[in-house]
Amino acid sequence: MRKLNLRSRIKFGMTRCRRHAGLVSASVLLVLLLAACKSAPAGRPVDALELIDSKSSFYIAVPRAADNVLIERIITGFYSDATEADAKMIAERVNKVYCGLNRAKNETEIQASIDGSVPVKYLPKVLSGKNGWVVSEYTPDGSATNYKIFSNQIELSFPSDKLGLAGRDIEGMLKKYDSLSKLPAEDTTELYSELEPELTSYLKGAENEIRFYANKPQSFLTILTGAQLDLKLIDVKGAFRTDPKHPKQYFLDLDFQFKNGTFLKAGKSLLILAFGLTNSQEEIIGDSELIIHGIRLDKEQLYKLLSL
């Protein structure tokens, strides 16, 4: 299998600007603070994925089990005051990171929700006034509950001791949390997500691999391959998983949904050429789905792509 030679300057839909977080950097900062607020009143537990809306063009799920070192790198890369020991301890308390992203010309808009648990002692270290954080309160219409919003270069909020939120539309996420948390405690059979059920199931199923989905795949492919590929695609999803024989490498799998079989035939040739693949690495399912598997990627490359 041929290794994908990504250029060091290519980024995962991100800019170089450190003013905003990398793909998941800003969201993982939240794990420092997840136990900062009082637990919500007894009621239905809210799933972190339920708070991610359907207004993003790229989604990613990063479970700790997939690569705890990646989460440590992101923490120390974004929060410079965290020691290596702090980062390791914090990463061990993260369950999963969900992000939705929209890429603009000069920046990437992020919406993130974290499932985890971290000691309260980290709150004053990170959200202190001397570090530039401003605290405000938000009360959803018809609710008696006040939620704190911490604003700096990114907005953060912690509606419970197991959930942290960041980025776009904090108030919208808090409003949904408030509504769902007040449902009966036994109402846990349905996931109240704005995302399509198939996508929700795919992201929720990320346990030992990092999963992502792009519903605007043209830009994503250009960034990933460095080539302008004129493909008629509906979406692309994929996963990074550790190579068991080479722990410092990932295997990257990609699943392309074309608009029809004619576009698939043309796109297949371009993709095989762009990735330098063999016939054994591609598989056609039905009339419009192409799966490419086993692309090798050094973990160090992914760390740079995601965490700067």
Image (cartoon, grey):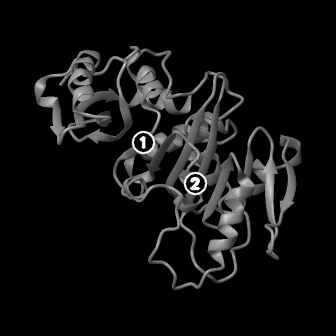
Q: Quadrant of the C terminus?
A: top right
User: Tag 2: Cα neighbours inside 10 Å, few (<14), some, or many (≥20)?
Assistant: many
Q: Residue at x 56, y 43 (%)?
A: 56
Tell me which corner region of the image, top left, top right, bottom left or bottom right, holds residue 46.
bottom right
Question: What amino acid is found at the position of numbered circle 1 in the picture?
Answer: Tyr
Q: Residue at x 86, y 54 (%)?
A: 135
Direction from residue 225 to residue 79 in the image, left or right: right
Mark 1 highlights which residue? 213
Tell me which corner region of the image, top left, top right, bottom left or bottom right, holds residue 234.
top left
Question: What amino acid is found at the position of numbered circle 2 in the picture?
Answer: Ile
Direction from residue 92 to residue 255 in the image, left or right: left
Residue 24 in picture, x, y percent from top left: 56, 41
Q: Residue at x 49, y 28 (%)?
A: 12
User: In terms of secondary structure, where does tag 1 sit?
Assistant: strand
Residue 23 in picture, x, y percent from top left: 55, 36
Q: Nearer the viewer, residue 105 or 41?
A: 105
Direction from residue 141 to residue 244 in the image, left or right: left
Mark 2 highlights which residue? 52
Determine contact: label 2, label 1, CB under 8 Å: no
